[in-house]
Amino acid sequence: MIKWFKGVQMFIFVLLVSLTPAFGQMGEMGQDHDMKMKNNDKAEKHGEHGMGMEMPQWKKTLTEEQKAKADKMHLELKKMMSLLESKVSLKEAELNSLVTQDKPDTNAIHSKVNEITELKKEMMIKKYDHIAEMRSILTPEQRVSFDLGLLGHHEEHH
């Protein structure tokens, strides 16, 4: 039992280390926003916008105060999502253990599925709360560009 627990701990540690960079890929608030920001940040250092994609208008017009608030909000979201993702991974490992027993307890399996579902629900709530909070720091003009990104439309297409 102790070896199994240490194995699960090691699995979670390795998973966290390997997934931590992936948490930056949350979505332009729905459209891979953090990944685009990361690519744009790299590209801006080289004088380009990255992979042929124009930086969203709302991001170009952020004030220093808005940038600071957005960075703080992104950090808090990433911390929360990292913790929740770790919990999901642990619960999934526990679920796999339950399923692979000689006589699986379906009630325990269903309970574990419910726990995982609740964690994933919490992650979705955090993500969409973050989107709403991001919108709250933008001006009405910036929100138009931001909302177009959410809806999968880009300014250059209009």
Image: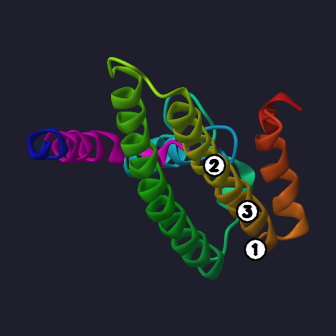
**SS at mark 2 in the image:** helix
The mark found on residue 137 in the picture is 1
In this rendering, position of residue 91 left or right of residue 56: left
Q: Residues within 10 Å of mark 2 (few under 14, many from 20)?
A: few
Q: Position of residue 52 (x, y in %)?
A: 56, 28
**Which residue is at the front of the view, 49 or 17?**
17
Residue 129 - label:
3
Q: Amino acid at mark 1?
A: Ile
- The reply to whether the magenta stretch includes residue 19 is yes
Q: Is residue 35 above or below residue 81?
A: above
Give the side of residue 21 with respect to residue 111, left or right: left
Quadrant holding the N terminus: top left
Q: Residues within 10 Å of mark 3 (few under 14, many from 20)?
A: few
Q: Position of residue 90 (x, y in %)?
A: 36, 44
Q: Which amino acid type is marked by label 2?
A: Glu
Alpha carbon distance from label 1 to label 2: 29 Å
How far across and how far down the image is residue 83, in percent?
42, 58
- Tell me: residue 74, above or below residue 20: below
Q: Which mark is residue 118?
A: 2
* Residue 22 appearing in the image: no
Q: Main secondary structure of the magenta part?
A: helix
Magenta span covers which residues? Answer: 7-27
Between discs 1 and 3, the one toward the N terminus = 3
Q: Nearer the viewer, mark 1 or mark 2?
A: 2
**2 vs 3, front mark:** 2
